[in-house]
Image (cartoon, grey):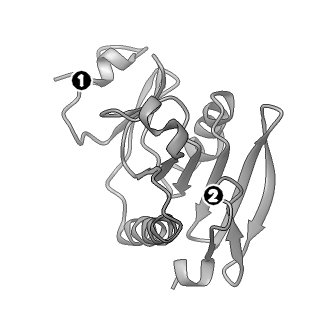
Amino acid sequence: MLTAEKKKKYTIDDYMLLEEGAPFQLIENDLIMSPSPNSLHQALVFRLGHFMLSFLEQQNIDGYLGGTIDVVFDDGNVFQPDVAYVSPARKAEIVKNQIYGAPDLAIEILSPSNAYYDLRQKKDIYEKYGVKEYIIIDPIQETAELYALEDGLFKLQQKAAKTELLHSMVLAGFSFDLQKLFR
């Protein structure tokens, strides 16, 4: 098994030597360890997944929806977003045992151990590789921010508070009620 102390720059080859379920992501060639998500974080992931899956089934959309799956961007960046969505048109192209390339939509839920990475480094990589929509959920402030890719850069499209709806641009017609999310 790989130990984090032996190298200063890691690659996907090193990452793949980790045991399945190891609490690491590869961010800018660094192995970043995250503790297990707390109960609120997990509840939010399940609720978001439920909202999205219900919408996809109602609309008969056969995209890929998942969480805690490796998203491989390049040799030095392998992320595990809390929720990832890939459109039906791209599903067969990029979803294998992992997602190879940018999902259409990535959602991250902030926690004290990961907020810096989600707000800075991961956001920059999502932008660089063309994730069309990036949603950041802040469980402490009970807010959500939706960034959409425009001309290769993320632009804040919506910031929603607990009493508001957040409207996806990638999944036309999909929105979720933050009050139900943060209940």
Mark 2–mark 1 Cα distance, whole angstroms, equals 40 Å
Disc 2 residue crowd, few under 14, some 14–19, many 20+, Cα 10 Å: some
Q: Is residue 92 above or below residue 58?
A: above
- The N terminus, quarter of image: top left
Q: Residue at x 80, y 53 (%)?
A: 156
Choose top left, top right, bottom left or bottom right for residue 102. Answer: top right
Q: Which mark is residue 61?
A: none
Q: For this rendering, which residue is in front, 167 or 125?
A: 167
Choose top left, top right, bottom left or bottom right for residue 53. Answer: bottom left
Report x, y in % for residue 166: 69, 70
Report x, y in % for residue 54: 46, 72
SS under mark 2: loop
Residue 130 visible in rendering: yes
Q: Would you name the residue on which mark 2 appears?
A: 171
CB under 8 Å between discs 2 and 1: no
Q: Residue at x 52, y 36 (%)?
A: 90
- For the residue marked with disc 1, what is the amino acid? Thr
Q: Would you name the residue on which mark 1 appears?
A: 3
In the image, taking residue 10 as reference, residue 143 lies left or right, namely right
Report x, y in % for residue 145: 70, 60
Disc 1 residue crowd, few under 14, some 14–19, many 20+, Cα 10 Å: few
SS under mark 1: loop
Q: Residue at x 58, y 37 (%)?
A: 122
**Foreground mark, 2 or 1?**
2
Q: For this rendering, which residue is in front, 170 or 70?
A: 170
- For the residue marked with disc 2, what is the amino acid? Leu
Q: Is residue 42 above or below residue 71?
A: below
Report x, y in % for residue 155: 81, 46
Instruction: Decide which of tag 2 and tag 1 comes sooner along the chain.
Output: 1
